[in-house]
Every structure is written in structure tokens, then in C-alpha cells.
Image: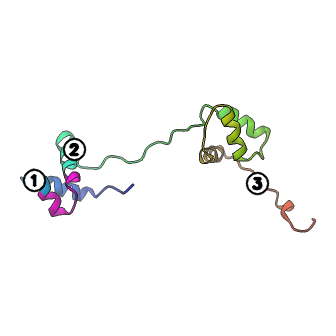
Amino acid sequence: MPLALSNDLRQRVIEAIATGMTCREAAARYGVSVASAVKWHQRWRDTGAMTSLATGGVRREVLAEERDWLVARLSEQPDITLRALQSELERRGTRASYGALWRFVRLLGLSFKKNPARQRAEPA
């Protein structure tokens, strides 16, 4: 999603419209779309605010209801793969993406670290 245009530009467009210029004229003069000029002017007229609205939002935690079960399952078998955990969750009736599971495990501070001694090509 593109970033909002500067508040300075918004202010200049709104002031031009307020002094009698049409939205189309102001949009052409400042190089913005007519729709933007109209929306900015409507928002200023209705609320008095010239700044852009906040973007983004809060990501809903899909696995909040399964938190206790997941923590117990990960403590029971700490080396379980995320794909296996995902299929177990699906059997329980909860659909979650691989990324959602990865974020959940990361937020818990859990990770499975392989033993570097076992990765050697020759015996220890």
C-alpha cells in the first residue's frame, strides 16, 4: 500500500479549494487526483482535520484460543515440525497458516536448535 501524501500538500490543496478554486482545478494545479482533492476537502469540511488517517492495524492472533494446548504440545515434543503441528491443529478444527504458527512459536521464545556436534561429517 502506498504511503499517504504529505500534510503540507493536503493543506495547500484544501486552502486552494477553500479560497474558491474547484476541486478539479486544485487537483490539476498541485498534481494530485481529483478523487484525492475531493476526499481531503470532504474530510476537512466534516471533521476539520487535514492529516491522513492512520494506516495498518492490529493483527488478530488466530491461535489465542489454542495457546494452552500448543504450549503443552510443544513442551511434550519440542522437536515437532511446524507442518506437523499445523496438521494436528487442523484435526482439532483450527485452521492456521504456517506463518501464523511460526510467529506464535517465536513470540513464545521457543525454538528448536539442532545439536552442532551431530552435524559433523566425522565422528566426534
Give the SS element for disc 1: loop
Q: Nearer the viewer, residue 48 or 41?
A: 41
Q: Quadrant of the C terminus?
A: bottom right
Check disc 3 and report the residue beneath it: 113
Drawn side of residue 52 relative to residue 44, left or right: right
Q: CA distance from mark 1 to mark 2?
A: 16 Å
Check disc 2 and report the residue beneath it: 43
Which amino acid type is marked by label 2?
Arg
Give the SS element for disc 2: helix
Which amino acid type is marked by label 1?
Thr
Give the SS element for disc 3: loop
Give residue 95's position: percent from left, percent from top: 61, 37
Give residue 55's position: percent from left, percent from top: 38, 48
Which amino acid type is marked by label 3?
Lys
Q: Residue at x 84, y 63 (%)?
A: 119
Q: Residue at x 22, y 44 (%)?
A: 43
Residue stretch in magenta: 25-37
Mark closest to the chain's N terminus, 1 or 3: 1
Q: Residues within 10 Å of mark 3 (few under 14, many from 20)?
A: few
Drawn side of residue 48 relative to residue 76, left or right: left
Q: Nearer the viewer, residue 24 or 63?
A: 24
Check disc 1 and report the residue beneath it: 22
Per the picture, the main secondary structure of the magenta-coloured stretch is helix
